[in-house]
Every structure is written in C-alpha cells, then in structure tokens.
Image (cartoon, grey):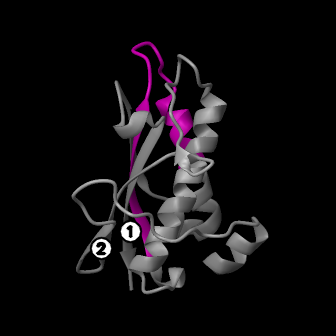
Amino acid sequence: MNAYDKLKQLNITLPPVAVPAAAYVPWVQAGNLVFLSGHIARKDGKPYAGQLGKNLSTEEGKAAARNVAIELMGTLQAACGGDLNRVKRIVKVMSLVNSTGDFTEQHLVTNGASELLGEVFGEAGKHARSAFGVAQIPLGACVEIELIAEIS
C-alpha cells in the first residue's frame, strides 16, 4: 500500500504548505535529504497554545503531535514535487513539547507524530527521534516538530 492509499484509508487530506511565520523556508534539500522546518501545533487554524502538565493532558498533546505530522506530510509532499511516494525513509523527528518542569511524558506526546508516520510510510516511517520538554514555543504552541526525510 502506498502513502496515498494509507492516507485515504485514514481519511487524511494533506494541507498546503504553511507560510513561514519568520525568516526561514519550509524545507531545504541537501542531496537526497529533505530537512523540514519546525511546524507548530494548530487548532481551528490558529496556534494550539497550552502547556503540557499545566492545562493540557498527555492525550491532548499526542493528538496535537499527530496533527503536526499531517502538516509535516503536506510540506514533505511539496518538497517531493507533489509525490510522497518518493519518500524512501523518514530519517529523524525532533519534537519540542511546551511543558512544565515536572512533566515527563514528552516521549508519549511525540508518539502521536511517530505512530502516524509509521502508519503512513510503513517500514520507511520508522525513524530516529528526540523529544524535549521546553519552557515555551513560538506563539505559545504546545508542540513543535521538525523532520528529516530521505527521498529518491
């Protein structure tokens, strides 16, 4: 099953590339690697503000991370010239979780993105990963994730 079949099965429509909020580009390609800039969690078209361990639960954060993965795939599709089937491997995911000092479930929040990438890309979706707790993310967002992919 290719990526588009899986997205259809999951009833996911990929969004267009978001306009950068500052002085950067959505992605850079170096050889066969594509580096996607960090994407923040959004809810109802606005930054999904909140802090894990304060006013958001782990499950809410996990759902936010899943939504960030959908946004990332939209950008990755554009970086692949409109064809996600060019993705050979999701290489690395780095997740920043806006969380209190005593919140320790950043890895579970980030699973929202990692699990979806695995569902969509199968073996090629298994990736190296880092998940960090941070004091704040731009615009107060609860989660920001960046991604590196290998493409053909």
> In the rendering, at what x and y percent does residue 110 appear?
51, 41
Q: Which residues are magenta?
A: 88-113
Picture disc at residue 33: 2
Instruction: Name the residue: 27% across, 54% down.
Output: 22
Disc on the earlier residue, 1 or 2: 2
Instruction: Name the residue: 71% across, 79% down.
Output: 5
Report the amino acid beneath label 2: Leu
Picture disc at residue 85: none
> In the rendering, at what x and y percent does residue 28 appear?
26, 71
Element at badge 1? strand
Q: Is residue 105 magenta?
A: yes
Assess whether mark 2 and mark 1 are in contact (beta carbons under 8 angstroms): yes
Residue matched to label 1: 149
For residue 121, say whether it is visible: yes
How far separated are the C-alphas under marks 1 and 2?
6 Å
Residue toward you, 137 or 57:
137
Report the amino acid beneath label 1: Ala
